[in-house]
Image (tube, rainbow, N blue to C red):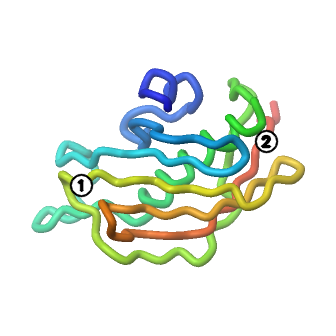
Amino acid sequence: MMDIHEILKRLPHRYPLLLVDRVLEIEKGKRILALKNVSINEPYFVGHFPHRPVMPGVLMLEAMAQAATLLALASTDIVLDDTTVVYFAGIDNARFKRPVEPGDQILLDVTLDRAKAGIFKFSGKVMVGEQLAAEAQLICTMRKIAD
């Protein structure tokens, strides 16, 4: 388990783009289960959509990627610093099955499929209770920032 304080030590993201509130389970090299509480106070709800607020699909993908990054870091025992970042390298087979609305709690269920030479491939799901909200395969890469 990881609380928000531990997450803040590991991820560079901050408000309004930090999208993981807690890690419920983590199995190094295999799987992570994290959660995000979705609140009406999130800044994107002002414009997406004022008459029916829903969490943008790209932010569901970003939340999965942040959980995936936590899994990759735990699996490799790497600590990010100011010279290392994790980027998206690809998103495959993204599907959105159900809107995520204020008051929902999303579970980010991400599995590490492959890791080689700083490139990681994950399968992820966003769940609201027992309902699938989104799923995708994510490819991420860990790189040093060039000066």
The residue located at (49%, 29%) in the rendering is: 2
Q: Secondary structure at mark 2?
A: strand
The image quarter containing residue 4 is: top left
The alpha-carbon separation of the residues under discs 1 and 2 comes to 34 Å
- Residue located farthest toward the left when viewing the structure as drawn: 51
The amino acid type, in three-letter code, at marker 1 is Asp
How many marks do you count on the picture? 2
State the image coordinates of residue 8 (x, y, percent, origin top left): 49, 26
The residue located at (75%, 50%) in the rendering is: 141
Q: Residues within 10 Å of mark 2 (few under 14, many from 20)?
A: few
In this rendered view, identify the residue nearer to me: 28 or 54.
Answer: 28
State the image coordinates of residue 7 (x, y, percent, origin top left): 50, 29
Look at discs 1 and 2 and give the one toward the viewer.
1
* Residue highlighted by disc 2: 143
State the image coordinates of residue 32 (x, y, percent, origin top left): 56, 47
The residue located at (62%, 64%) in the rendering is: 123
* Residue highlighted by disc 1: 104
The amino acid type, in three-letter code, at marker 2 is Arg
The residue located at (24%, 63%) in the rendering is: 54
**Circle nearer the N terminus (1, 2):** 1
The image quarter containing residue 83 is: top right
